Image (cartoon, grey):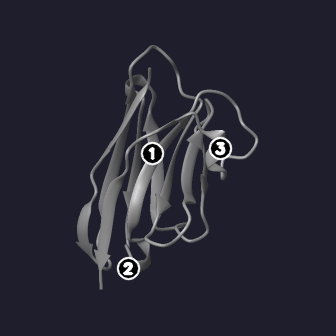
């Protein structure tokens, strides 16, 4: 059984920064990709960013490009999301997701095998 645990959420003012962390553990495995999704109240879950493959290829939602940076630590099965220049519209529960093998569409939540419980990010104006 794999456990995925996020941390680092909180309350921040508009323009501020937060760093989210996610740890995947529970059995010996090497995640192919690790990503972040978010869900704001009354809205559908949406893709934020993913890091995948041995070359650490990254993809970002257009809404966060240039402000958010995703990175991973293979040795620890961890992924991070550095969020800068935060805006009130970034307010959401942020979820970490893990995929164990190559998938074609990393923007789709169904491509991921394991999920965390989420961490709240609130950006005040």
Structural distance between the alpha carbons of marks 2 and 3: 27 Å
In the picture of the structure, the residue carrying the numbered disc 2 is 88
Residue 90 at x, y percent in the picture: 42, 71
Choose the circle earlier in sequence order: 3 or 1: 1
**Relative side of 86 to 97, left or right:** left
Q: Residue furthest front?
A: 42
Q: Is residue 106 above or below residue 11?
A: above
Residue 50 at x, y percent in the picture: 56, 47
User: SS for tag 1?
Assistant: strand
Choose the circle earlier in sequence order: 2 or 3: 2
Q: Quadrant of the C terminus?
A: bottom left
- Crowding around mark 1 (Cα neighbors within 10 Å: few <14, some 14 to 19, many 20+) is many
Residue 27 at x, y percent in the picture: 43, 15
- Which disc number belongs to residue 96? 1
- Crowding around mark 2 (Cα neighbors within 10 Å: few <14, some 14 to 19, many 20+) is some
Residue for point 66% across, 27% down:
101
Residue for point 62% across, 34% down:
55
In the picture of the structure, the residue carrying the numbered disc 3 is 110
User: SS for tag 2?
Assistant: helix
Q: Residue furthest bottom?
A: 125
Q: Nearer the viewer, mark 3 or mark 1?
A: 3
Residue 91 at x, y percent in the picture: 38, 71
Q: Which quadrant of the structure image shows residue 51?
A: top right
């Amino acid at each position: 059984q794999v456990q995925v645990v996020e941390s680092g959420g909180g309350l921040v003012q508009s323009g501020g920064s937060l760093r989210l962390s996610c740890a995947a553990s529970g059995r010996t495995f090497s995640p192919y990709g690790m990503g972040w999704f978010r869900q704001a109240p009354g809205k559908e879950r949406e893709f934020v960013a993913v890091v995948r493959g041995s070359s650490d290829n990254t993809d970002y939602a257009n809404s966060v490009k240039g402000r958010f940076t995703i990175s991973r630590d293979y040795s620890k099965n961890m992924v991070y999301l550095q969020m800068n220049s935060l805006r009130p519209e970034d307010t959401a529960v942020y979820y970490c997701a893990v995929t164990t093998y190559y998938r074609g569409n990393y923007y789709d939540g169904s491509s991921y095998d394991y999920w965390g419980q989420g961490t709240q990010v609130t950006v005040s104006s």
